Image (spheres, rainbow, N blue to C red):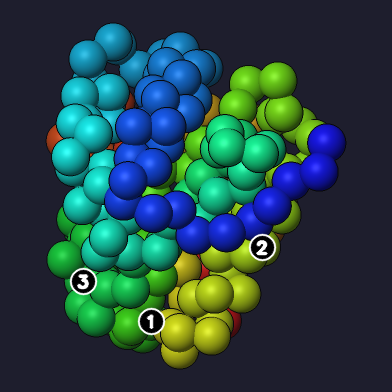
Amino acid sequence: MDLELRTALPEEAYKIALLIRGAMLSYGKDSHIPYGMLESLTESVESVADRISRGHCLCFWDGPEPVATVTLTVVSNPLKYSFSEKTADALSGIAPAGYISRFAVRSDLRVSGLGVKLLDAAEDLAKDLGVMGLILHSSSDNRSLSAFYSNRGFVLTDSEKSRGYNRGLFIKRF
């Protein structure tokens, strides 16, 4: 498979939304998150297009189809993601930060190394944009995904349950 890495365009939002939806259904199941608790499963194509136009939506493409995606958004004040004194302390030294969201790899390509390549590309872009580190939220109960992030230098800083599941804040400093 000959894949192309490029930034998605807003008019490709429908295809990106389908990829994310499929991945988030698996993520929810693997993380034991009750159906309907993930914001990403109710996201409209218009909101995906808006996120693509506001952020940096990197994708691996197999011809016209996206097979992996991640969005990087530069956040000037990462303290907005703070939910405890511990997270406030951890986030205080990494402004601006890159916020990773909507990380998805097509199910048949998971554990192929494609997610690592995509996350590396997002990190390279973040460094080029001058951020001090990366932050992301993920289920802290999903052991394989937590290990994936940990193996890439992210530290699970804290978790909270405001969305009905253990939602961890992972931070990687540069």
Q: Disc 2 and disc 1: Cα gap in Å?
A: 19 Å
The quadrant where residue 107 appears: top right
Residue beneath disc 3: 79
Q: Quadrant of the C terminus?
A: bottom right
Badge 3 marks a residue whose secondary structure is helix
The quadrant where residue 47 appears: top left
Q: Tell me residue 75's x, y (percent).
A: 27, 73
Q: Which mark is residue 94?
A: 1
The quadrant where residue 160 appears: top left
Does residue 63 sit above or below 89 in this rendering?
Answer: above
Badge 2 marks a residue whose secondary structure is helix
- Which one is in front, 33 or 5? 5
Amino acid type of the residue that numbered disc 1 sits on in the rendered structure: Ile
Q: Is residue 164 toward the left or the right of residue 174 in the image?
A: left
Precedes in sequence: disc 2 or disc 3:
3
Q: Which mark is residue 120?
A: 2
Q: Disc 2 and disc 3: Cα gap in Å?
A: 24 Å
